[in-house]
Image (cartoon, grey):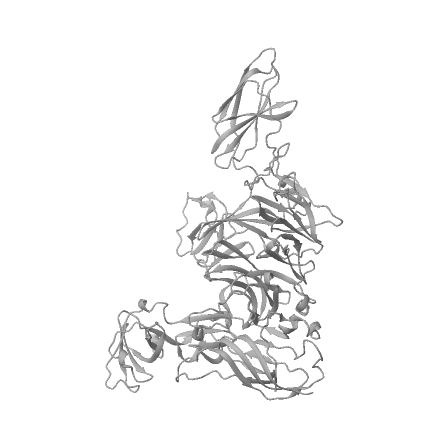
Amino acid sequence: MATATQRSFAGGEIDPALYARADTVKYATGLKTCRNFYVMKHGGVCNRPGTQFIAEVRDGDNPVRLIEFVFSDDQAYVLEFGHHYMRVIQNGGLLTVGTPAAWANSTAYTYGQVVSHNGTNWSCKLNHTSTLAYAPILGSAYWHPMTGDTYEVYTPYDEGLLQLLQFVQSADVMTIACEYASVYELARLGQTQWAFSAVAFEPAIQPPSNLTGTGTVGEDAKLREYLITSAKKETYEESYPALLMSGESGWSFPVDIAWDEADDAQEYYIYRADNGVFGYIGTAQGTSFEDIGYTPDFSETPPEEYNPFYGPWAPANASSPGAVTYYQQRLIFSGGRNRPETLFCSQVGNYHNFTLSHPAQDDDAFSFSLAGRKLNAIRYLMDLDGLVIFTASSILVAQGDADGALRPTAINVTNKASTGAANVAPVEVGNGIIYVQARGSVVRDFGRTVSEDGRSAGYAGNDLTVFAYHLFENHKILDLAYQETPHSIIWAVRDDGSLLGLTYLREHEVWGWHRHDTDGYFEDVCTIPEGNQDSLYTVVRRTINGETKRYIERLAPRTLADPARDSRFLDSHLSYSGRPDDFASNPSMTLSGGTDWSYREDLTLTAGAGYFVEGDVGNEIHLYLLDDLGEIADTLRVRILSVTSATVAIVRPAKDVPAELRGVAAQSYGLAVDQLGNLDHLEGKTVHILADGSVETPQVVTGGEITLQKPAVIIHVGLPIEAEIETLSLENASGQSLVTQPKLINKVWVKVKDSRGFMAGPDRNQLYAAKVRSDEAFGETTRLQTGDVEVGITAKWDSNGRVLITQPDPLPLTILSVTPSGVISS
């Protein structure tokens, strides 16, 4: 009897071109198929949880884009960008506005503010003071109609621009660049007030006004020119200069200068011209200054009025920056269609200020252009121990001076890779970057390498698709997202609607691909932190009753308090729970009227507060007995036969009533129902059902409803997921090949963790069920298994000895090792 255990699947699904490379680690840890399973970071595999239905996009005929907006771990949002609208999702639900105040005349309204008018909710899309002419109506320049009470704001972007938008966020403000639109900022002013504003690229403070000057007319009188600027409180950002000139007769020293105070000014800087060049002569704390003939310091000159948007990105040129990032306290733009190889860097700490001075100061704004054999159209900018510049043909890094500071006189751009980037936003993963190579069919990493002595040894990258190229050949990757926890997975949307996953730990040289599909097409992905893990949100295009629908869905968590009952391995699913998280919130329930308290008796169930409705007839109350740890130790099901009042129902128990529940007020219970509605998004679909941990017969959704075989407290309904892995052919890592030796596999051991049920066999036509029940009582939910599960399979001679394992049910399956056993013919 021969056995061969595979203890790791970290190699993921590998390309058929590697099937002859049994001598490699990838073969030893790889799989022939890894579909709707994902590789865990410690090497096991687990079936993918399902997606929870969040909402249908506002207009299902048009694609949308999901953008993450993360202020903190507990203030994270997904933004749904569609054709001239944006909606906001938090904690798995669309933000709503409740009952807004009615629109009123002669009232100041600001962008994103919500009112109600003529039965519709509206959000303001232009700051204004209302008049009757500005009342909310369709087509209004001032108001955007919302759908119901779902919060929604107007955006300047039509459908064709969505995939071109690039974002960078600082605190509650997101800057958005698009080469076919002006630069906008999106600010979160409140939970349900978000505002777009076009960015004015100028200093944040105005220069002083009403400048006056007096001076004597003596022998040294000459034409005098002064420039005075304001310095903003706290930041000391300098304004544009205001000009003061003497009359034709000129002034002799001393010259007294005065001006009106500028709002929010800390102090004022005075410059005087000599031979047409202005140099610094002094600082004033107040609104006057006396020039007694100071010698100008030409190493400090006033800022020049410079705005890159008046040059290559002027509106008349119909070109704006296409890429944006923050780097070393500068806001950096690049990628305008008229200057695709040029970068524009703001002043340090003053993100809207692009003013210059001569000679240039270290904190000045500046610009620079890339040079090379090819025109390097800049596509993305990122911060990774240097300003990383992704272009269409290469990757460059601006490293600044010897200390790494980027400044006008120290840019130091070097080419680090000759593999350009596609128009897919890269993602930062640990101390590296994952990006899609130009032309879209290769995914690579890029980052610092470390030498044996622990020092940085430069930049390097790897082709992460080389061992699974069959997943990418003749396809393009359209979107990337990184889910750091729990298993460090990069998700990639493929052009045919498949979702590829890459479990990636660069520091351990681990990467393994897995593929995922659904009854529909994945179109977009993003991740945000929620609770103790990162949540993956997706846009899925589905066909429902012959119509195209686009849904926003969230990948369900696998770590659950009650995984046996609450497993969510169904796509586009909705759930029902008839019990609260805290039983103390339940009104009390008391059984009375029993004689022998048997299952043959009708009993009275009295609630401590209004609870029952007429529609509860046929439903059940499940009364729980808890152990010392608060876990459910026993369940009494009582069916509701009739409802006498909101607090009284006649019930019949499913078994003899335990003494602990006879005439005793109980709060540990749940309401079990046998009908589930609100399933309109799956109308006409055959759905699978998990009810109180039991797999029910699939049903077709009709009228948005299904009826269960029996009432249940916790119900999950959604589209089935077919999950499968298949091992590679049995082979020797060294020595004589086993290809020519027939193999007879008649048994397989599968080491599982927190799992329940699976099928195994040599192929799809011969699958055998693993034993799932042990000593559970009748009616008790089958417990999850951890350990070795033996599956006997019908033996047949073949040349490969592969094992196929599937999970056809909406139940958890985590596989740590697979050991086929049988005979290998000599």
Q: Position of residue 593 (x, y in %)?
A: 23, 81
The single residue placed furthest to the top in the displayed view is 219
Task: State left or right for residue 559 relative to residue 546.
Answer: left
Tell me which corner region of the image, top left, top right, bottom left or bottom right, holds residue 668.
Answer: bottom left
Q: Nearer the viewer, residue 451 or 18?
A: 451
Examine the rendered structure and indicate whether residue 62 appears above or below residue 544.
above
Examine the rendered structure and indicate whether residue 518 appears above or below residue 123.
below
Q: Position of residue 207 (x, y in %)?
A: 53, 31
Tell me which corner region of the image, top left, top right, bottom left or bottom right, holds residue 508.
Answer: bottom right
The single residue placed furthest to the right in the displayed view is 373
Task: State left or right for residue 706 relative to residue 375.
Answer: left
Which quadrant would the C terminus be assigned to in this image? Answer: bottom right
Residue drawn 52% across the image and 60% down it: 58
Task: State left or right for residue 456 relative to residue 759.
Answer: right
Examine the rendered structure and indicate whether residue 796 appears above or below residue 616.
below
Q: Position of residue 6 (x, y in %)?
A: 60, 76
The single residue placed furthest to the front in the displayed view is 453
